[in-house]
Amino acid sequence: MSFSNEVKAELISAVTDKDKKYACLYGLIIFCNKITDDEICFQSESAEVADVFVSLMNEIFKGSVTISKDVIERKNGTSLHSFVVSDSESVRKVTETFKIDAEKREIDLKNIDNNSLSNFIAGVFLSCGSITNPESGYHLEFVINSEQLCDDLFTILNSIGFSVKKAVRKNNAVLYIKESENIEDLLTFMGAQSSTLEIINIKILKDVRNRVNRVRNCDMANLNKTSAASVRQAQDIKLIESVMGLDSLPDTLREIAEARLDNPEYSLNDLGEILDPPIGRSGVNHRLKRIKQIADGIREEMSKNE
């Protein structure tokens, strides 16, 4: 099951008492695929949403609304559940109950009890909403086939503190949210608290992975830097060894030179610890700089003689 369908299944389980069911069904219907004076058509790819649509219709209208059902099998392996109310008496009963004007198709807040706004928006999400898997990104959207409904929902969501953006896609209006915290708040408001926690957990895991990668990259960069410095130091020491011999160096410099040749992978701290007596990083660095100066002097003399 996709994450979007998991969210929808959780929202369905939160619809319990009569007012919540009424508000949820209103959201499902007003944002459905088609409403005219002669027909109401509701379609969903989710079997769970399809079942709850029929269940709520039968419960609210006491079985008095005739609904025909069809399942369309698609080439990509998915199914489209289609429900049609087409007899004039059933259509009239639904539109009059929810005070729906098929031509204007706008939200009537009188249908929503103050405590049921969250269930209405949950119904809207069940009807035309989707959310991406948080493992791949953060994106929640409503795809709406009515500009008026889009404007109405935009106003409602903004009025209760949710920042949504508008777009147009294939002649449909789209309201969307990309900020993870905003998505979490909306899911919680609609009644999908477990899905909210799942997003938060995924964000934590992503953050831990990113931190580990940053540390690994930093360690690799430091290792590369240490390796490059070690190669340069070894070149200086071998040049001195071939021209002057390491015995020509003061004991302190000869000791660090031999230690570097024997331990090319060691950091400056590591080199300092194996000396007798041990010295700190700055001491090691100072001695290697003196060796570099000697090597540079040799190179300069060799250059003059060429």
Image: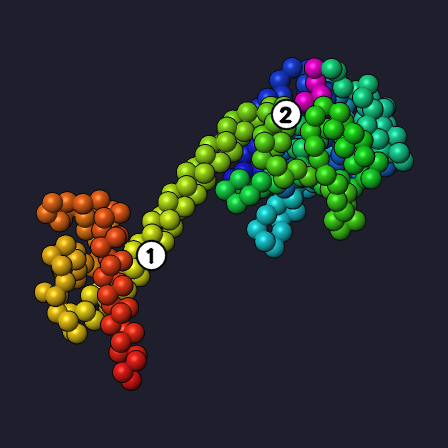
Tell whether 167 sits left or right of 182: right
Please check the rendered image and state whether residue 180 is part of the magenta-colored stretch, yes or no.
Answer: no
Q: Amino acid at mark 2?
A: Met
Up the image or down, 94 lies above or below 131; here it is: above
The residue that label 2 is drawn on is 190
Measured from the top left, where is residue 108 in percent x and y?
Answer: 83, 24
**SS majority, magenta:** helix
Q: Nearer the viewer, mark 1 or mark 2?
A: 1
Relative to 30, residue 172 above or below: below
| Residue 231 appearing in the image | no
Q: Are there few (<14), some (14-19), or many (20+) residues within 10 Å of tag 2?
A: many
Q: Looking at the picture, does residue 268 appear above or below residue 66?
A: below
**Image quadrant assignment for residue 129:** top right
Amino acid type assigned to the residue bearing label 1 in the image: Lys
**Label 1, label 2: how far apart the Cα atoms are:** 52 Å
Toward which corner of the image does residue 305 lie, by quadrant? bottom left
Q: Nearer the viewer, residue 26 or 81?
A: 26
Verify whether residue 117 appears in magenta. yes
Residue ID for mark 1: 225
